Image: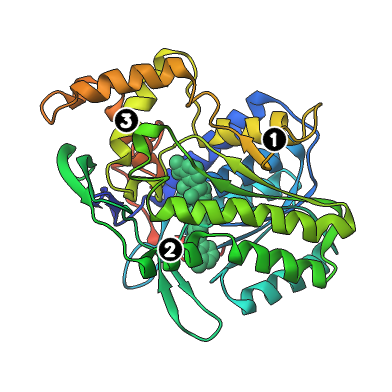
Amino acid sequence: MIIRPQIQGCVARNCHPIGCRAAVEQQIDEIRAAGQFNGPKRVLILGASSGFGLASRIALTFGAGADTLGISFERGPSDKGIGSAGWYNNIWFKQAAEQEGRLAVNLIGDAFSDAMRQQAIETIRQQWGQVDLVIYSLASGLRVMADGRQVRSVLKSTGQPFTGLGLNLERYALEEQTLPVASAEEIRDTVTVMGGEDWQLWLQALQAADCLAPGVQTVAYSYIGPQSTYPLYRDGTIGYAKEHLHSTAEAINLQLADIGGHAWVSVCKALVTKASAYIPVLPVYLGLLMGVMKEQGLHEGCIEQMHRLFASKMYGAQGVVADGHRLIRMDDHELSPAVQVAVSALWAKLTPQNFASMGDFAGLKRDFLQLNGFDLPGVDYEAPVNIKALGELQP
Ligand code: NAI
């Protein structure tokens, strides 16, 4: 079958499996070109199949020779569809890692569940005994609690509603989007899904099972952003969840003191991923930011960002480079005054008519398509894809 992109609003409804392989290979090539660093050798990644989690896995495997256990929630091909990009990313990553002589194990299922924690513990015991690094990179709209209750996160404002121009990737057009005000319950629920509680449950379970090596590190990914985005991120429901994640780092750090371990939060730069494209209005900021950072020679994609995190800010000559709140500031370039002044100047002039000539919205759209295996150089999109044969490959 010939596969063309199906985008609905800011969500990709399909993927191109062969293009996903090209996207994984592209990231591996970037890491090979960036050079080796001395990093952890046994790594557990929660949310390993796309975005920051996948980039972390590639950076550590091909940059530092790490063996990895990756957990993700993805769909394989079935009579309902081709399957998700993350499903194929897991397959292609594992093949490439094994060719490199590295161990790569994938567990597919709900990382919020105790059953998955047990499965991960069993796998770690069988493969390595212990892990040196645990990466928490889940982005989810839903958490099923131990008692079966379903809790949903929402992307809303707090205090007062926020309206601004947002990007519709399907129509490649700007349109007005509003973040309504969240109720107290919605804020609480978003913290339950995207805050630090589940991260802590993982570290508690792993430590109780003696699966954490002495001196273990753990890192979760967060975002703060500039003041211009506070109403839609930092002061929104997701911002409350991230605050909770930050304070959980302190609690986990105390917990790990017994084994000389440490917990950190990496405050990352805004980047195009499945999760960030879904946040109202944020992709407009992102399109402008990408243009300005490229112009100033500061642009980083997921893979460059994760390489810099591990090679320079966690496992470089200076060890972990963090502020007094356990935050590793990977958003340093994004938040530099020169970048923010330029973004704000463009944002003030942005209209639905002129947006395509400002920032780098074409680059943003290309990055979004590439996350789903489309628009990659070297892929023949006119060639039919044999989904039946791909269905025999297991992640
Ligand atoms: P993503 O959507 O690309 O990846 C999310 C990962 O979580 C996927 O591997 C998915 O399979 C997995 N996942 C979701 N629900 C799951 C479940 N129930 N069980 C197992 N796996 C599950 O998202 P992205 O952007 O890479 O986000 C990762 C983290 O980075 C999030 O905490 C996000 O807030 C944070 N972050 C993202 C930024 C961005 O600009 N994209 C900026 C700063 C932080």
Q: Position of residue 226 (x, y in %)?
A: 42, 32
Residue at disc 3, secondary structure: helix
Tell me, yes or no, whether the two marked residues, 2 and 1, touch with CB atoms within 8 Å: no
Q: Amino acid at mark 3?
A: Gly
Ligand 1 under 8 Å from disc 1 Cβ = no
Say if disc 2 is inside 8 Å of ligand 1.
Answer: no
Q: Which mark is residue 388?
A: none
Q: Earlier in the sequence, mark 1 or mark 3?
A: 3
Label 2 with label 3: CB-CB less than 8 Å: no
Instruction: Indicate the quadrant containing the N terminus: top left, top right, bottom left or bottom right.
Output: bottom left
Q: Is 191 displayed left or right of 166 in the figure? A: right
Quarter of the image that includes the C terminus:
bottom right
Above or below residue 160? Residue 144 is below
Look at label 2 and name its amino acid: Thr
| CB-based contact (under 8 Å), mark 1 and mark 3 | no
Residue at (34, 32) in percent of width and height: 228
C-alpha distance separating marks 2 and 3: 26 Å
Q: Residue at 66% x, 29% y: name it.
A: 32
Observer-nearest of 378 and 361: 361
Residue position for label 1: 322
Judged left or right of residue 248, residue 2 is left
Q: Residues within 10 Å of mark 1 (few under 14, many from 20)?
A: some
Where is residue 337? Give x, y as percent: 45, 18
Residue 171's place in the image compared with 341, above or below, is below
Q: Residues within 10 Å of mark 2 (few under 14, many from 20)?
A: many
Question: What amino acid is at disc 1?
Answer: Ala
Q: Where residue 115 sits in the image (x, y, percent)?
A: 63, 79
**Rendered image: mark on residue 287:** 3
Question: Which of the 4 image quadrants contains residue 207?
Answer: bottom right
The secondary element bearing badge 1 is classed as loop
Q: Say which mark, if any, is on residue 190.
A: 2
